[in-house]
Amino acid sequence: MRIGIVVDSACDVPSDFIGQEEITILPVTVQIGNAVLADMRNEEATLNFLTGDTAAQAYNAETTPYTVQQVHDLFLSKLVLDYDYVFCICTTRSRSGIFDNAQQASFTILNDYKPVRAAAGNNTPFSLRVIDSQNVFAAVGVLAIEAARLRAAGEGAPKIRARLENLALFTQGYMVPPDLIYLRNRIKKRGDKSVSFFSAALGSALDIKPILHCNRGDTGPVAKVKGFNTAAEKLFDFAGSRVRAGLMTPTMSLSFGGELASMRALPGYERLRETCAEHNVEVFESVMSLSGMVNVGQGGLVVGFAAEPAKFE
């Protein structure tokens, strides 16, 4: 059975991994003023897009996920021909409309695929499963990496499906946003009132950085730390402690809203890398997606892994 993997572009995985595993991207289009870019996980294009006046107005960005019709057309024109079963792994539906669009498209895809495959001389069944990762950014990448690992191991679609759906419940995403004023302006633009102006202004005045946690679609603060570098170090050290306690996959996923050299220079980064190496955990690093950067702010740090819940300390 030929198994395909599809992710939306807010899933943070390295570009070489996408190419090697032949992962298909559902792009999110970002518009800031007159500047428009469909995010296809091109790291250079992302970094070049967010410069000058465009970067200064990023909090006003409009983001548009693939529509139901676009998802349908992509599958019928390519994926139903290339594969027999496709896993479509999406950013949590609580933060993005892409899961609902893909889920709705799946019904018409399964109704319409037979003539397309038959015309190519293939009368065997086609199926797909849309997976709600229940997480964001680098944490979504944990599921994509596991899907590719299981496929390479020769596992069948039913086992991969069960594994991914269970793993989504235990995937932990942690984020340090660089600028609370930016984050407050951005979520206000999106209609989210979870960060008040007073809290944002106070945090910025005192250089307080929250560490946010996402699991099962819910996001909230687990710590408040003075200074971005200190918060990053605390997050890296916590991630290292979870590696030592034992992860559910041999994977640590990191993404950063800028050049990766800046992330690698943060305190605690090297300790986390050494801990992962000692425990045979592979580290995947990527530049944050364009939609991620406009929602979180340039310079944001995200760490994702799969493990039992644990108190952040």
Image (cartoon, grey):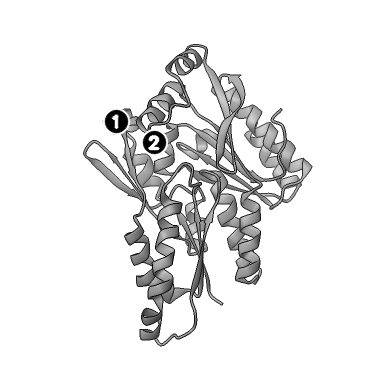
Badge 1 density bin: few <14, some 14–19, many ≥20, Cα 10 Å? few
Q: Is residue 126 left or right of residue 143?
A: left
Which residue in the protein does label 1 denote?
52
**Frontmost residue, 164 versus 244:** 164
- What residue is shown with label 2? 294
- Asked where in the image residue 148 lies, by quadrant, the reply is bottom right
Horizontal and vertical percent for residue 2?
Answer: 53, 75
Real-space Cα distance between discs 1 and 2?
14 Å
Q: Secondary structure at mark 2?
A: helix
The image quadrant where one finds the N terminus is bottom right
Q: How many marks?
A: 2
Left or right: residue 24 compared with residue 252: left
Q: Is residue 168 visible?
A: yes
Q: Is residue 157 above or below residue 230?
A: below
For the point 56% across and 24% down, the residue is 210
Name the spot of residue 240 as percent of width and height, x first.
71, 37
Q: Residues within 10 Å of mark 2 (few under 14, many from 20)?
A: many
Q: Quadrant of the C terminus?
A: top right
Please, is residue 115 above or below residue 41 in the view? Answer: below
Q: Position of residue 212 (x, y in %)?
A: 57, 31
